Amino acid sequence: MLKPHILDFSIDELKKKLSTICEKPFQVKQIFQWLFIHYNIDFKQMTNISLDLRNRLTEEFDCFMPEIIEEKESAEYENSPPYPPHKCGGKNNSPHIYGEGRGGNSTKKYLLKLSDSSLIEMVFIPNPDKNTLCISTQVGCSRKCSFCATANIGLQRNLTQAELLLQLYLARQDNPHSKITNLVLMGMGEPLDNLQNVISFLKVLQYNEGLAFSGRRTTISTCGIVPKIYEIADLDLKFKLAISLNSAINEKRSLIMPINDIYPLKDLKQAVLYFRKKSNYRVTFEYIMIDDFNMEKEDIKALKSFCSDISCKINLIKWNNVPNLPYKSPSEKQIQKFIQDLHSLPVAITYRKSRGEDIAAACGQLAGRQT
């Protein structure tokens, strides 16, 4: 019979299970310290625990760690000077438009092999003021967004609670001098299609007896699965929500995002408004800029109509090249013009500079393969 992974339990379940194995309560506390303070699941290294107890832990639990089979480091931003913020407009209600800060160490992309030999990717993005880890939630994805590399491989399976947590553990171990301050569920897969495991992951992540990670520094991204947005709005958990919007025109959005045929923009907007009533955080709309597709006057007018009554911000991201897809990234000149043309929108706008495009680690490029 397969042993359960040590990180596949809720905090209460793990306490209960360990209490049947440990002879004294303080031993449970010691194990929790190794797991959630030291980010260490290797029973052999738990040296302040008796050998007999370590052997019993080995008998009861699996402590498999995914294998890093490839690690790539971007050369794009290494030793670059900081990219200064810039603003558009002078009135109090005008949006602030920022380029993402540059500097610090380079972006890293990891190709991980799971226990069943499935492959996933995660990305570590350092900055002077924060360090972000982008994790995957599925092996592949079923949502078929036409601009995304992950869509090309289809859905193979969901990741378990342990497999979600272990991405964070591996990143911590590989970057011991860089504290991970922000976590985004924006890698391979649709997080809301793996909702139960994502919820249990968030609970271990946020509970004080778990990893005690800040909810305001955790972001879940979705293509817009409306019923699940209502469901997560009612959770007793804190996190930020990002919606992959990419067009506020129904016909255009449906061309690149099949989910829009199931849950069109009017339904998505109602779900977002409901979520916003339940959350202290603004919703982020991710907007991938595609040349000759979604950067015209009609797109700006539609964005204004869709977003103006929502407490939100818009993240502008240029389309990052994926081989064999029929799209083109806009030029920097086109991007700057689009930003200036958006000045009439009464929401915060961010132009998020791509990180790791040279190693296929940027938004939309992850595909869980060796390249």
Image (cartoon, rainbow, N blue to C red):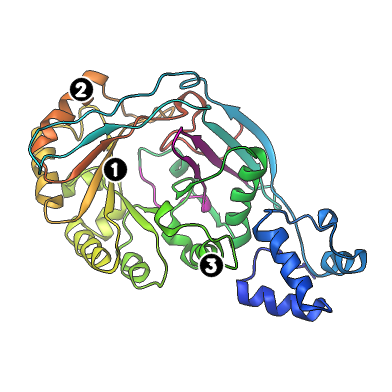
Quadrant of the rendered structure where residue 291 is? top left
User: Residue 256 bears which disc, if any?
Assistant: 1
> Residue 242, which numbered label?
none
Q: Identify the residue shown where x is 47% and y is 20%.
A: 76
The foreground one among 48 and 282 is: 48
Q: Quadrant of the C terminus?
A: top right
Q: Does label 3 or label 2 sit earlier along the sequence?
A: 3
**Which residue bears the numbered disc 3?**
207
> In the image, is residue 330 above or below residue 91?
above
Q: Position of residue 181 (x, y in %)?
A: 49, 46
Distance between the Cα atoms at labels 3 and 1? 38 Å
- Residue at horizontal 56 percent and vertical 43 percent from the top: 179
Q: Is residue 128 magenta?
A: yes
Q: Is residue 137 left or right of residue 85?
A: right
Q: Over which residues does the magenta segment extend?
A: 119-145
Query: Is residue 125 found inside the magenta-colored segment of the image?
Result: yes
- Where residue 187 appears, x then y in whole percent? 48, 45
Determine whether the residue tagged by mark 1 lies in a helix, strand or loop. helix
Residue type (three-letter) at the residue carrying disc 1:
Ile
Number of residues whose C-alpha sits closer than 10 Å to that of mark 1, classed few (under 14), some (14–19) or many (20 or more): some
Q: Residue at x 85, y 55 (%)?
A: 44
Quadrant occupied by the N terminus: bottom right
- Total numbered circles: 3
